Image (spheres, rainbow, N blue to C red):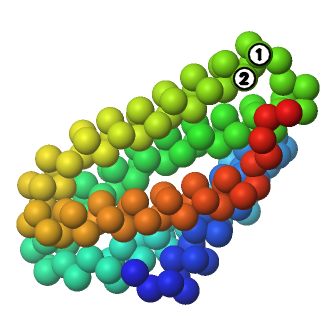
Amino acid sequence: MKRGNKGVFVLMLAAVITVWFASPAVSQDKPADNMDILLEKIRADKKLLVAANMELTEGEAKAFWPVYDKFQDELFLVRARTARAIKDFSDSYKDMGNEKARALLEESMTIESLNLKLRQAYLPKFRKALPEKKVARYYQIENKIQATLNYELAKEIPLVQ
């Protein structure tokens, strides 16, 4: 994976996730504001990053991209849930009680479980579209993006006080 493209993409994605849900005005103002445009750009940039690293034949591409698009739509929902959890944490971390800490931890575990279930659910679909080595490559790309995103978010999220 090309480092320059990946780094820019992940930083933009991390910024969007934190800003999108950290600022209620952003998500409630207008349906087609600058944040929506930025989200679409990030999705397009990610698709370009994946395309550049998958080396798909024409036939593979025809089978892969529809599955990819559906997977990304569902993955976006999980990431949106993550962003809501981050916002919920940021709203309460300074004076968090035990019950809130428990609820946030449970939500975090649920999100991790949903992420794994989603990846497992799409594995047979990707296997139907691509040879096994390319499926493995795609999952590696997703893993690298997610790991980098997690790292960037972890740097910004303070420990519970």
The part of the image, by quadrant, that contains residue 68 is bottom left
Res 34 seen here:
yes
Q: Which residue is mark 2?
A: 101
Crowd class of label 1 (few under 14; some 14 to 19; many from 20; radius 10 Å) = few
From the viewer's side, name the closer residue of 89 and 126: 89
For badge 2, the amino acid type reads: Ala
What residue is rendered at 62% in x and 27% in y?
105
Q: Position of residue 37 (x, y in %)?
A: 64, 64
Callout 2: SS: helix
Crowd class of label 2 (few under 14; some 14 to 19; many from 20; radius 10 Å) = some
Q: Position of residue 48 (x, y in %)?
A: 41, 77
Q: Is residue 132 above or below residue 95?
A: below
Q: Which residue is mark 1?
A: 98
Q: Which mark is residue 151?
A: none
Is residue 140 shown left or right of residue 109? left
Q: Position of residue 51 (x, y in %)?
A: 33, 77
What residue is rendered at 84% in x and 24% in y?
96
From the viewer's side, name the closer residue of 92 and 128: 92
Res 39 seen here:
no
